[in-house]
Image (cartoon, grey):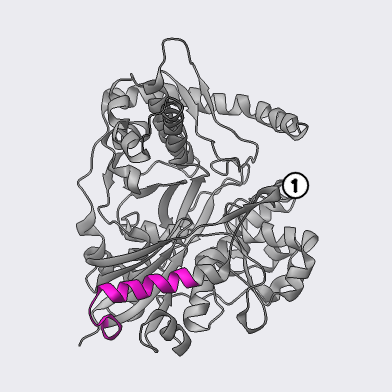
Amino acid sequence: MSREIIIGIDAGTSVIKSVAFDLSGRQLDVASRPNSYDTGPGGAVTQPLARTWSDCAATLRALADKMPDLPSRVAAIAVTGQGDGTWLVGADNTPVGDGWLWLDARAGDLAEEMRRRDGDTARYMATGTGLNACQQGAQLAYMQTHMPEALAQAECALHCKDWLYLKLTGERVTDPSEGSFTFGDFRTRTYDDGVLEFLGLTAQRHLLPPMCDGTATQHALTPEAAEATGLRAGTPVALGHVDVTCTTLGGGGYLPGQDTGCTIVGTTGVHIGCKQDTDVQLNPAERTGYVMTMPVPGVVAHLQTNMAGTMNIDWVLGLARDVCTALGVEVTQERLLEHVERWMADSPPGHLIYHPHISEAGERGPFIDQTARSSFIGLSTAHGFADLVRGAVEGLAMASRDCYSAMGPIPASVTLTGGAARSDALRATLAATLGASVRRSSRAEAGAAGAAMIAAVGTGVYADMTACIQDWVVPTLTDPEAPDPSLSAIYDRVYPQYVASRAAVRPIWHAMAQHRSTLV
């Protein structure tokens, strides 16, 4: 039987998925498992490494159960996963404690203090990335002070997808996207000694694994991994880039020769513009955002990330659910989501300003402030629940414009991925706020597809990524939806007020954070 299937693994924050594609990009089947995490004191958010691998292997076995003769049909496997965080391994590749996720806030104060140091501008100009508590650099620096025994046991510092790749192949590597934006230079795609010196991690350089580009290098599935997954030993495995860039690739955020952006409307909000690395417009005054290398020579994804995306909609819908529960009426999240379009239609646009910083970790794009919190401005007795829903959606759109504006001109067209992109009202609001046409990717598993595309190029199924995109991506995109001019005019008037009020309320965030610290 011919090998006509590529498996893309996507280990997200809440779900691990293994997705089968044919060689032309058609999705064949998927198997998934919940990927839960644990919380602890001081903002700790962790995940056991062994459990993550066990869950990943289970999805591959489940996929094999659903697809006849899968092991003999697999041409390659690729893996991507949640970015940032710190997953330490020691002797014999044994985990050193649990993995720190991107949600972990323990390094927040340290990251904020480091950002005030003179050398942070040079670090930012090399990495293109604002320092925050999510990143492995800040987390390792925190561990060096507060958990030196863990670093003493560690032999390598990985990320989620790197850990899974280690279990699949026995190789300790990371990809150029995570390696560069954390410790390196996005132009050279190598580690930068000056960055390590600024972070105070020169003595820990031995923990950094080599960078491996999955479009150029693959490793074989080990016999041990074959036994755990039910697949065939020796199958080529490609390390994908971080999930954000794989989602950008698979979801249509990079179309060669087109002025296209990509917004991921997920738990977080991610706003991305792909460009040549020589065209990146950095902002040394604010020092925010990320520059992540794409699996294409000389191309990077310049992005700003809101800490909270659809979490804001979940929160406002949670208010309705709480009221219903108190009255003895049980409603599901799915049922509430079905009413969002109606609530949006019942509320006039542009009447409220909402800052969508609902995450307890604060905000990281287009500014970094761990004390940032949400607020409504303009409420009166004339407003009802529908206005809160519209305000939350408009706040997400304003944050999107805020992020794109921090990176240069807003793209002419923006591709939307994520479940919330199916909402007609959300797409119309985003288009009008950005003043750009929007289109949606019908690709259900964009991250896994992007990883699989890396394997498709790496194993020679396609000569280059441009050819792969024509088959795997272009057919999945809907027609562009132009912005409503009258709605754009309203949001053009609101946007300066959104930005000004965000700046004005920032000192109050800090004062309130200080106040909360005094409460028992």
Residue at (48%, 58%) from the top-left corner? 278
Q: Quadrant of residue 250?
A: bottom left
Given the image, on which type of amino acid does mark 1 rest?
A: Glu
Q: Is residue 330 visible?
A: yes
Which residue appears farthest toward the top when viewing the image?
Answer: 381
Q: Quadrant of residue 467?
A: bottom left
> Where does the C terminus fall, quadrant-wise?
top right
Q: Main secondary structure of the magenta part?
A: helix
Give left or right: position of 337 versus 43: left
- What segment is highlighted magenta in the picture? 54-73
- Residue 149 image point, x, y percent: 78, 69
Q: Is residue 240 visible?
A: no
| Residue 455 forms part of the magenta stretch | no
Pointer 1 local density, CA inside 10 Å: few below 14, some 14–19, many at least 20 = few
Residue beneath disc 1: 113
Residue at (68%, 57%) from the top-left corner? 138
Element under disc 1: helix
Residue at (30%, 37%) from the top-left corner? 427
- Residue 220 image point, x, y percent: 43, 86
